[in-house]
Image (cartoon, rainbow, N blue to C red):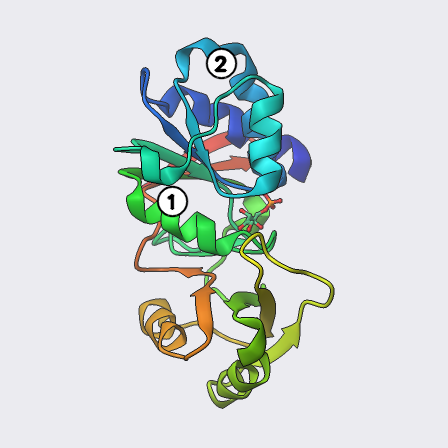
Amino acid sequence: MNADAQKKAAAEAAIAHLPRNGVIGVGTGSTVNYFIDALAPLRDQIPAAVSSSEASTERLKRIGITVEDLNSVAEIKVYVDGADEINKYLQMIKGGGGALTREKIIAAVSKQFICIADQSKLVGTLGEFPLPVEVIPMARSYVARQLVKLGGRPVYREGVVTDNGNVILDVHGLRIDEPLTLEEKLNNIVGVVTNGLFAHRAADLLLLGGPEGVQEMR
Ligand code: 5RP
């Protein structure tokens, strides 16, 4: 199985973990697109979804699933999303698709976070993938200087404006031995909206597609 087939298998495995008749949270990215495709035959059993991006919202609506504003939803039982990197503690780097802020909000609200990914995403130490940081535009240079002080090499994601109207710095060269501490330090930089480290709110279940099939990790 190549990476795409592994993503598809992981995405389809998530269907068995969905609640009966509950609102679900839906992430963003190519793996999640497979998940949305797999939701189509179940549309009548899903009262509504909360989506982490305009792109996923559009895809969900196209298959006939109602998308609700998070503020009008009392509870999300399960949130399904991909990751750019994930370690054995199910801590992740996310935001390769630029949707990290809404993803972190929905993850915080949801009772269970199911990460769907292909095998290449499982790493020993987070940080090989550049860490996305969403920043208020006027603070971009200031935040970049603070990121350099933390040992990173921030690169402005040119031409990208997030769904929230902000910009993204991708931080290269970080070896993230202490994800919990780094997530806190990044949150403390004025001008940072969200950083793509999901350490405090890690996944609860990883469905990892590999050559032999889908493995569950908790
Ligand atoms: C988007 C994300 C995605 O989950 C992450 O980039 C993985 O994407 P893909 O499933 O395309 O590999 O965090 O902001």
Q: Nearer the viewer, residue 187 or 122?
A: 187
Residue 1 visible in this rendered orientation of the protein:
no
Question: Is residue 6 positioned above or below 97 on the image?
Answer: above
Residue 49 visible in this rendered orientation of the protein:
yes
- Where does the image place residue 170, in percent across and percent down from the top left? 60, 69
Question: Is residue 98 positioned above or below 191 on the image?
Answer: above
Lower position in the chain sequence, tag 1 or tag 2: 2
Question: Is residue 112 positioned above or below 174 on the image?
Answer: above
- Say whether residue 9 is left or right of residue 189: right
Mark 2 nearby-residue class (10 Å; few <14, some 14–19, many ≥20): some
Instruction: Identify the secondary structure beneath mark 2.
Output: helix
Residue found at x 52% / y 67%: 133
Q: Nearer the viewer, residue 192 or 33?
A: 192
- Where does the image place residue 137, in percent across and percent down from the top left? 58, 72
Q: Amino acid at mark 2?
A: Arg
Mark 1 touches mark 2? (CB < 8 Å)? no
Residue found at x 51% / y 20%: 65
Question: Is residue 41 positioned above or below 24 on the image?
Answer: above
Residue found at x 49% / y 90%: 149
Which residue is labeled 1 in the image? 106
Mark 1 nearby-residue class (10 Å; few <14, some 14–19, many ≥20): many
Quadrant location of residue 63? Answer: top right
Instruction: Identify the secondary structure beneath mark 1.
Output: helix
Which residue is labeled 2 in the image? 43
Q: Nearer the viewer, residue 194 or 174?
A: 194
Quadrant location of residue 169? Answer: bottom right
Residue found at x 32% / y 68%: 180
Q: Which mark is residue 133?
A: none
